[in-house]
Amino acid sequence: MLLGTEVVMSYVVDFADVSSVGLESSPVAPALAGLRANEARYYRNRYDHEFAVSPASEVGDVVDWVHRILREERGLVIASRPLEATAFEVEGIRMAYVFYESGLSINVMYAIDDAGKRAVGFKLSDGMEVPAELASFKFARQKSRLAGTIRGSYFVIKGEY
């Protein structure tokens, strides 16, 4: 896994001027763009981190890592096509995000310290249905100026990745 490497063809997400660049094939592209911008704003405000994404095809190691955790922890296989992904480290936490064509966003928060928190989070863009593979999860609602209503859920990672 190459989470520490730099990605050459990346797009810095602008949360002041939300764009659906890279997400155009999604049926909920504007809402997914808002969700992506919401994440960018969080990391800028909380960690002064610039949130940049790359086409999923160019960062297959990130997508594979997230998919491996889903499969090994919960037997989950996401049916939707990954459009974009990113991975970075902030304050001792490895973060990875994958944004899917359906409007789904999955993030992995993986503390480097063995005693730290490790979890997988799911966020559903406004206007999308809960994917069949995530039907067993309960989703809480959150309002966002950038993304409308975000529905989210998570699970704690038990294994080592």
Image (tube, grey):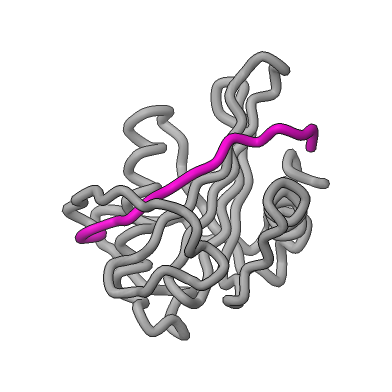
Q: Is residue 6 visible?
A: no
The magenta-colored residue range is 147-161
Q: Who is closer to the viewer here, 145 or 78?
A: 78
Q: Residue furthest right?
A: 1
Left-right relation of 109 to 161: left
Q: Is residue 126 above or below residue 73?
A: below
Residue 155 in the magenta stretch? The answer is yes
Q: Residue at the spot x=28%, y=63% of the render?
A: 18
Q: Who is closer to the viewer here, 139 or 107?
A: 139
How far from the left and from the top, in percent, is residue 141? Answer: 26, 51
Picture quadrant of residue 133: bottom right
Q: Residue furthest front?
A: 136
Left-right relation of 83 to 62: left
Q: Which image quadrant: the C terminus?
A: top right
Q: Residue at the spot x=47%, y=54% of the render?
A: 137
Q: Residue at the spot x=50%, y=46% of the render?
A: 121
How far from the left and from the top, in percent, is residue 108? Answer: 59, 43
Q: Is residue 15 above or below residue 29?
A: above
How far from the left and from the top, in percent, is residue 31? Answer: 30, 69
Left-right relation of 147 to 60: left
Q: Is residue 65 visible?
A: yes
Q: Residue at the spot x=28%, y=74% of the render?
A: 127
The secondary structure making up most of the magenta span is strand
Q: Is residue 75 above or below residue 3?
A: below
How far from the left and from the top, in percent, is residue 84? Answer: 57, 66
Residue 38 in the magenta stretch? The answer is no
| Count of numbered circles on the image | 0
